Image (spheres, rainbow, N blue to C red):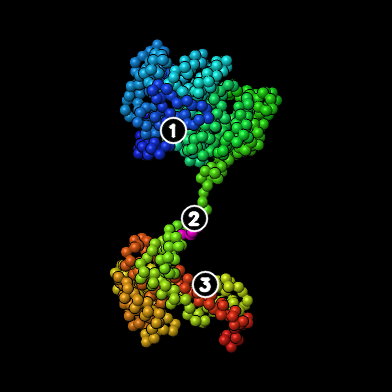
Amino acid sequence: MESCLSSAMSVIEERRKKRKLSEESGKWEDRRVVSGNFEATTMATGQLFSPTTQALFYNYKQLPIQRMLDFDFLCGRETPSVAGIINPGAEGFQKLFFGQEEIAIPVHSTIEAACAAHPTADVFINFASYRSAAASSLTALKQHTIRVIAIIAEGVPEADTKQLIAYARANNKVVIGPATVGGIQAGAFKIGDTAGTIDNIIHCKLYRPGSVGFVSKSGGMSNELYNTIARVTDGIYEGIAIGGDVFPGSTLSDHVLRFNNIPQVKMMVVLGELGGRDEYSLVEALKQGKINKPVVAWVSGTCARLFKSEVQFGHAGAKSGGEMESAQAKNQALRDAGAVVPTSYEAFETAIKETFEKLVRAPTHIISTISDDRGEEPCYAGVPMSSIVERGYGVGDVISLLWFKRSLPRYCTQFIEICIMLCADHGPCVSGAHNTIVTARAGKDLVSSLVSGLLTIGPRFGGAIDDAARYFKDAYDRGLSPYEFVEGMKKKGIRVPGIGHRIKRRDNRDKRVELLQQFARTHFPSVKYMEYAVEVETFTLSKANNLVLNVDGAIGSLFLDLLAGSGMFTKPEIDEIVEIGYLNGLFVLARAIGLIGHTFDQKRLKQPLYRHPWEDVLYTK
């Protein structure tokens, strides 16, 4: 016992913390005795139990009472759910455990005395034998404080059961059973042995409410379904086993109609069985539109047709009295009425899972955190389109919202715009433009021509910005001198990204690089990474005249200064931006402008299909 409770302590603490919030938010509907009168409850009203529900236990049984108390403690209840015990002819106290604390529960000799002593206990759990269950239950029903009775005994005479049902209906009271294991309100209250041991309750997640209302005839199969439902949904909200006798005190449809009125119940699962016509009341309720939540149902006993003679299954009511009472007929009727009915019990779990995912917790297929087109106008990172126009935002501001999910300072967005302008085009001879021109002259459309040019972007053409940023950042952060950095790259067989140009030289610097450096020195709070890149350039120029800092290296190092100096990004965020490839995105975006221009230029000039001249090809054997 202690080991089970110890293993559940983490769950207990979580439930205690959430209890107050749950009650204040209206999660639980508490129907308590007020001035000696309980609120009238019909079977179609709502939930039966709450986290403050208390019960009187008739005919002392140590194990089921202890299981109720263990469940209470697991769920974080402040008070035990068993207020008193009724043991005819005996009075005093019974010692039991509430968590690790031993408590004394009062024992009363009569039902009347117990009800008078515990006026807030409105549930009567009857563990009397089938011989005396009816009489004691009727006595309890006549007490104005009792509104729900659970009769555990099997084999209660049918005439007595009918009398109990009639009295309960006439007085707006609820009977669960006979021949029931009881029921459970997940995270709130359970009857007797419902759901079994603490280990099983934890496994089935019954210590906190889910979204599924479950009702079954079979108590044993209830445990199986609690487990199944926990596997494929968020769990049980309330589960009831109505009992397997021919005349249950409440029916499948009674409880489904209740579940339909409980906001926290999003779907219902029903497990019936052959014999009787109880399921047809559910069929009628579905047909009449009284149920507007999904119902997944299965009637067991389809194997009965394999037997030549009538077969009596485990419950008194589980025998077919004709075709209408067969499992096949009931399943078909439920299916025709709109319930989700699988083709076999083996498919029951899948049907529950699919219904839950579709109607309760439908999984999304795409996650978006940068824009939202719902509502009156689209929003970029939470900023409405009208605000973007009214505030005079430019392309750099839009990029800051959609790429970085924040409004960057004006000098940052201006730098982004300068990068786009400077990298938009670099003439018709570079590989990207050449590919686009050839494709456009082949008569292809704009998108095909654009993509043809974009696909050339990579480590050798325009795709070195990210690598330049990565290597410069790593070297600077590690405190490497330009000599150590360059020589270390050389030993690894890696060219320094951002250094070197096919045309530009020491005495013919790239004007774009100079413009970027001039802007940064004027507007950036810090240019430490750029200055480091310049130091590296000074060293590499000592080796070769064309090893200048190119536009990739300038943008890569300066973007590091932008991210670090703006104070709007954490170090992990900066690392992620560089790793994902944001900086190459700038070149792709910018160069797309020029490639589109080359496409339009070729089409406007009506240029013919391009064929490379023979004299520009070296043919060798």
Q: Is residue 376 magenta?
A: yes
Marks 2/3: CA–CA distance: 35 Å
Q: Position of residue 230 (x, y in %)?
A: 49, 38
Q: Amino acid at mark 1?
A: Glu
Residue 15 makes an appearance in the image? no
Q: Between residue 367 and residue 376, name the one nearer to us.
A: 376
The single residue placed furthest to the top in the displayed view is 89
Q: Amino acid at mark 3?
A: Leu
Figure quadrant of the C terminus = bottom right
The residue indicated by pointer 2 is 375
Which numbered tag is attached to residue 29? Answer: 1
Residue 143 makes an appearance in the image? yes
Identify the secondary structure beneath mark 3: helix
Instruction: Bin the neighbour count of mark 3 within 10 Å (Cα to Cα): few under 14, some 14-19, many 20 and up.
Output: many
Q: Position of residue 604 (x, y in %)?
A: 59, 80
Q: Position of residue 348 (x, y in %)?
A: 58, 38
The residue indicated by pointer 3 is 454
Instruction: Bin the neighbour count of mark 1 within 10 Å (Cα to Cα): few under 14, some 14-19, many 20 and up.
Output: some
Residue at 35% in and 62% down: 569
Decide which of tag 2 and tag 3 comes sooner along the chain.
2
The single residue placed furthest to the front in the displayed view is 390
Residue stretch rendered in magenta on the structure:
373-381
Q: Amino acid at mark 2?
A: Gly
* Whether residue 236 is situated above or below residue 401 in the rendered picture: above
Q: Does residue 172 appear left or right of residue 532 in this picture?
A: right
Decide which of tag 2 and tag 1 comes sooner along the chain.
1
